Amino acid sequence: MPARFPGFEPRGVIPAVLLPFQDDLSIDEAAYRAHLRDVGGVRGVTAITTNAHASEVASCDPEEQDRVLEITLEELGDRLPIVNGIYADGTLQAVRLAKRAAAAGASALLVFPPGVLARGNAARPDCLADHVRHIAAAVDLPLIVFQYPAVTGLTYPLETLVQLAEEVPTFRAIKDWCNEPALAERHIQVLHGLARPVHVLSTHSAWLFASLVTGAAGLLSGSGSVIADLQARLFDAVQRGDMAAAQALNARIRPTAQAFYAEPFFDMHNRMKEALVLLGKLPCAVVRPPLKKIEERDIRRIAAALSDAGLLDCRRLAAE
């Protein structure tokens, strides 16, 4: 099946949605459909990402990933471009996932770096680049390359990104998680300045306002599963140059970022599920192992953050 949005350029506000589970750890398809409709209906959202960190892709087998993409396309595929994550340590496996996503009707692919390259990638960045080249050779969809922080050992050197941009026409964006403000700004300066620009999408959700002000072409964020409206309004304000409005929106986003991205960092999407339960948008916050349900005191912190953001009336919640 051809992409439903040919010529799609990954930019603007692209939430990465969560994946609800039932108590038996099976996918809760009804809750997922409702979640998709909720996030996809937010004004200013330009695309939706699934089969990524936010949807616990590491805990989903390939057949489940196929089904998740199928449901996403059924609910939103006629209205919004769908970005499908390609999460695999082996390049051959990644190519197979990419082909299946393209055949199903995805509009773009988010390419995760293979974890097996974490030890030594700095000495052989060509291996990481070849992973992208193989996927690009197999499908014609726009590719979003996931740029990890240097501490992970899975960072593309900027010169490698430039080389890929020159070689691979379908390399259209990076999801930038370099976690270094100066480098993030350098990514924007260099990649946006290419003859065929590569869009920089911020995933620096803990300091989103600052990352957007430096000129990011958009954002791709798991916290968009909860605060897509605030993110879309923030991006719009920055694009219009209305810094007063942007600062006011950032003040509302800040408490949620502090709650979601606290240590341990791996619980961020776990916390987002709890937030949606508090907001009455998910029936439960089940996560798959090795993740575990967070403690009640952490849920109280999330409730307070949602209240500070103007999203939840804690007095009503206490009364219930």
Image (spheres, helix red, strand yellow):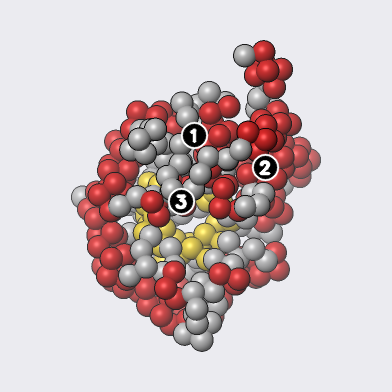
Q: CA distance from mark 1 to mark 3?
A: 14 Å
Among numbered discs 2 and 3, the one appearing first in the sequence: 2
137 on left or right of 269: left
Question: Which of pointers 2 and 3 indicates the residue nearer the eye?
Answer: 3
Q: Which residue is mark 1?
A: 285
Which residue type carries mark 2? Ala
Q: Which residue is mark 3?
A: 290
Quarter of the image containing the C terminus? Answer: top right
| Amino acid type shown at disc 1 | Ala
- Residue 162 placement (x, y as % from top left): 50, 76
Q: Determine the residue located farthest toward the top in the rendered image.
A: 319
Considering only order in the chain, which callout, 3 or 1, is on the residue closer to the N terminus?
A: 1
Location of residue 50 in the rendering, given as x and y in whole percent from the top left corner: 40, 47
31 left or right, relative to 225: left
**Residue at the spot 71% in from the left edge and 31% down from the top edge:** 304
Residue 122 visible within the image: yes
What residue is drawn where x is 31% and y is 65%?
94
Going from the N terminus, do you reach mark 1 or mark 2 first?
Answer: 2
**Pointer 2: what residue?**
259
